[in-house]
Image: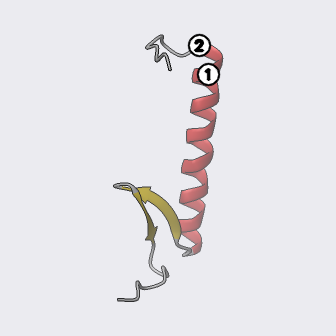
Amino acid sequence: MTITSAPPSPQAQAMLKALQTAVANSLDKKQKLGQYAVIWQNGQPVQSGGDAPKAVS
């Protein structure tokens, strides 16, 4: 496999910005509604928020 380090095209940068904005808006909405979110952190899924289910040990 060949890996290149060319900068992303303007179209790809616009798509990335749109996705980042959509995710930020969604997480903000969940926080305002008091809902938890599942995010990826340190290679594992993590439930974040006040009403997140507690881990069973």
Q: State how far apart marks 2 and 1 are (Cα).
A: 5 Å
The residue lying at 51 percent from left, 65 percent from top is 38
Residue for badge 1: 12
Is residue 52 rendered to the left or right of residue 42? right
Q: Secondary structure at mark 1?
A: helix
> Could you say which is closer to the camera, residue 45 or residue 17?
45
What amino acid is found at the position of numbered circle 2 in the picture? Ser
Q: Quadrant of residue 5?
A: top left
The residue lying at 54 percent from left, 49 percent from top is 24
State the mark number for residue 3.
none
Residue 47 vs 51, above or below: the answer is above
What amino acid is found at the position of numbered circle 1 in the picture? Ala
* Residue 10 x/y as whole percent: 60, 14
* Residue 54 x/y as whole percent: 42, 85
The residue lying at 54 percent from left, 16 percent from top is 8
> Could you say which is closer to the camera, residue 54 or residue 36?
54
How crowded is the residue under tag 1: few (<14 C-alpha within 10 Å), some, or many (20+)?
few
How crowded is the residue under tag 2: few (<14 C-alpha within 10 Å), some, or many (20+)?
few
The residue lying at 61 percent from left, 56 percent from top is 26
Is residue 39 rendered to the left or right of residue 41? right
Q: Residue furthest front?
A: 1
Query: Disc count in the image?
Result: 2
Determine contact: label 2, label 1, CB under 8 Å. yes
* Residue 44 x/y as whole percent: 41, 61
Residue for badge 2: 9
Quarter holding the C terminus is bottom left
Q: Residue furthest bottom?
A: 57
Residue 44 vs 34, above or below: the answer is above
